[in-house]
Amino acid sequence: MFQFAQPNYLYLLLLVPIIFLLFVYSRIVKRKNIARFGNPELVKTLMPNYSSSRPVVKFYLLLTALTFVILSLARPQFGMSTETVKRHGIEVMIAMDVSNSMMATDVSPNRLELAKQLLSSLSDRLSQDKIGIVVFAGEAVTQLPITADNVAAKMFLSNINPNLVPVQGTAIGSAIDVSIQDLTSTSKAGKAIILLTDGENFEDNAVAAAKLAVKKGIMVDVIGVGTPQGSPIPIAGTMSYMKDEQGNVVVTHLNEEMCKEIAAAGKGIYVRADNTNTALNAVTNSLHQLATAPIENQIYSTNDEQFANLAWLAFFLLVIDMIIMERKNKWINQFKWF
């Protein structure tokens, strides 16, 4: 299929007829001036080296070269070329806590947003790997099946919010179980689950789930989000905080002990997230210990660029224009060509 990658440059072609009309006008004015000077035939005898055709030829060469330059700027594309790229990497499932407690502001801007920023940076470092996303609160849901599409992963990460899971609570064990099921059991690539949570687990046995992951050859890294000192949970759209049944303001704390137990059971690391790259670097180094394997062959199709051909044509026309002189060449005229 033929197309222009930068079609806006084609508007410059409007200059071509304008320049042509200006040239015609200048020729008419020049002839009138010569006629005022005297008889055109007599004037020619006074200028034996004058050529009336060469300036016209040079003008058309320049105008054609300008047209080719404009067309090359528009980047004409015709035909397709394909390139197959073999990717070696690992498989990583990201389990993100989206319970109400992740809206606490003991870290800036809040726990959930900090976790999303960290994972966005991490996905850039996992560009050669497969990534999947599980979100959990009182239950776990696969948000993005394992994929090599890094762009899609970042898009899904940006849309994560507590409304994705209607059942509130914190079921870390369920999140690990769902992540295990989503990882490719037949792949020889190293596998890992990255768990981002404040560690307030109320629903199931997360440690047992982490041990099960290890039995299946899956490492579990835990990133703690929040602070042990804790913070109230703001209610969106209001100036108040969540309260318990007795009317007391709920203060949520980062349960580092639980996070460390899960990481130890999963043969991974525990690190607390903050506004530095400490957690990002630690998790990246942990993942680098896993063995890579062929995970996908990607075929890239690109349009063949044709602008270089037009640029070369414009160059040759300009060279010819430089060679041709406006006046007759005495040395060439000595030869009897016919």
Image (tube, rainbow, N blue to C red):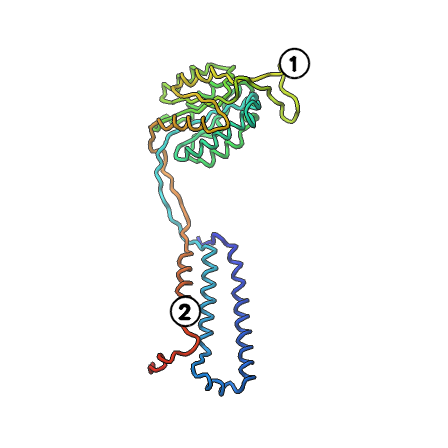
Q: Residue at x 47, y 67 (%)?
A: 63
Q: Nearer the viewer, residue 102 or 88?
A: 102
Q: Report the disc number at residue 37.
A: none
Instruction: Give the CA distance from mark 2 to mark 1.
Output: 90 Å
Q: Residue at x 46, y 70 (%)?
A: 60
Element type at marker 2?
A: helix
Outermost residue, top direction?
Answer: 246
Could you tell whether 193 is left or right of 102 in the image? Answer: left
Q: Are marks 2 and 1 in contact (CB under 8 Å)?
A: no
Which residue is disc 2 drawn over? 322
Under mark 1, the amino acid is: Gly
Snapshot quadrant of residue 216: top left
Q: Is residue 184 above or below residue 60?
A: above
Number of residues whose C-alpha sits closer than 10 Å to that of mark 2, classed few (under 14), some (14–19) or many (20 or more): few
Q: Nearer the viewer, residue 268 or 133?
A: 268
Q: Nearer the viewer, residue 140 or 306?
A: 306
Query: Taking the image as drawn, is residue 177 in sight?
Result: no
Number of residues whose C-alpha sits closer than 10 Å to that of mark 1, classed few (under 14), some (14–19) or many (20 or more): few
Snapshot quadrant of residue 188: top left
Under mark 2, the amino acid is: Met
Dot 2 or dot 1: first in sequence order is 1
Element type at marker 1?
A: loop
Which residue is disc 1 drawn over? 247
Query: Taking the image as drawn, is residue 190 in sight?
Result: yes
Q: Position of residue 16 (x, y in %)?
A: 52, 65
**Viewer-side label of 2, 1:** 2
Q: Position of residue 163 (x, y in %)?
A: 57, 26
Q: Is residue 200 above or below residue 299?
A: above
Q: Position of residue 93 (x, y in %)?
A: 43, 27
* Marker count (numbered): 2
